[in-house]
Amino acid sequence: MGCLLSEVFDTRSIKLDLDGKTKEMAFIELIESIAVLNPECDCRDIIEAIKKREEKMNTGICSGVAIPRAYCRGIGNMAGAIGVSKEGIDYGAPDSKPVHVIFLLALSENVKENHLHVLNQIFNLAHSEAFPLIKSAKNAQDIHSILSRTYQGGRSTI
């Protein structure tokens, strides 16, 4: 049994107009929003873990979506942040297209199974009719509402 996306991503960690123009700058911006909600975590540890993960394999999946993730100390379970870039970020994704939505995950070591469920939900969401609504959302609550309608099987009821 996995987590609902609306439980992983808090409205306070959803950024609609990322300031960062590079993936590293976007990572820092998103990790800072996770740290506000999880003050016990260390931003430097998370950014280093994310960078190491990206060196192993680029986390741009397709359709303008990236899911950077890493296991980190100081995270109770799973914490996420979403960043939307209207103009797109050169992410070095396999399809060579810019990334418009980043779903960043900071994970504790004890959530490996739930982590796979969450990745599946995000992947399915990125290929659903709900994804354009995320890209064009006017506020964080709109995105959170979309996530609330995405169930464990990854299907949206939109």
Image (cartoon, rainbow, N blue to C red):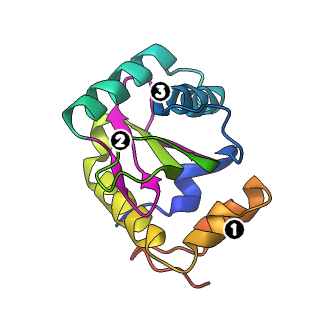
Residues under numbered marks 3 and 1 in contact, where contact means CB atoms less than 8 Å apart: no
Q: Is residue 55 above or below residue 8?
A: above
The residue to which callout 3 is attached is 24
Location of residue 123 (image quadrant): bottom left
Q: Is residue 153 above or below residue 114?
A: below
Location of residue 114 (image quadrant): bottom left
Q: Residue at x 36, y 19 (%)?
A: 48
Question: Where is residue 116 shown, x and y percent of the image?
Answer: 29, 57
Location of residue 49 (image quadrant): top left
Q: What's the residue type where badge 1 is placed?
A: Ser
Q: Is residue 42 visible?
A: no
N-terminal-most mark, 3 or 1: 3
Question: Where is residue 6 shown, x and y percent of the image?
Answer: 58, 60
Q: Nearer the viewer, mark 3 or mark 1?
A: 3
Q: Which residues are magenta?
A: 58-83
- Numbered disc total: 3
Q: Secondary structure at mark 2?
A: loop
Q: What's the residue type where badge 2 is placed?
A: Gly
The residue to which callout 2 is attached is 92
- Disc 1 packing (10 Å; few <14; some 14–19; many ≥20): few
Q: Is residue 68 left or right of residue 7?
A: left
Q: Secondary structure at mark 1?
A: helix
- Disc 2 packing (10 Å; few <14; some 14–19; many ≥20): some
Q: What's the residue type where badge 3 is placed?
A: Glu
Q: Nearer the viewer, residue 80 or 39?
A: 80
Can you tell which mark lies on residue 145? Answer: 1
Residues under numbered marks 3 and 2 in contact, where contact means CB atoms less than 8 Å apart: no
Q: Nearer the viewer, residue 18 or 30?
A: 18
Question: Where is residue 19 shown, x and y percent of the image?
Answer: 68, 33
Q: Magenta stretch: residue 69 in it?
A: yes
Give the alpha-carbon distance from disc 3 to disc 2, as whole Å.
Answer: 12 Å
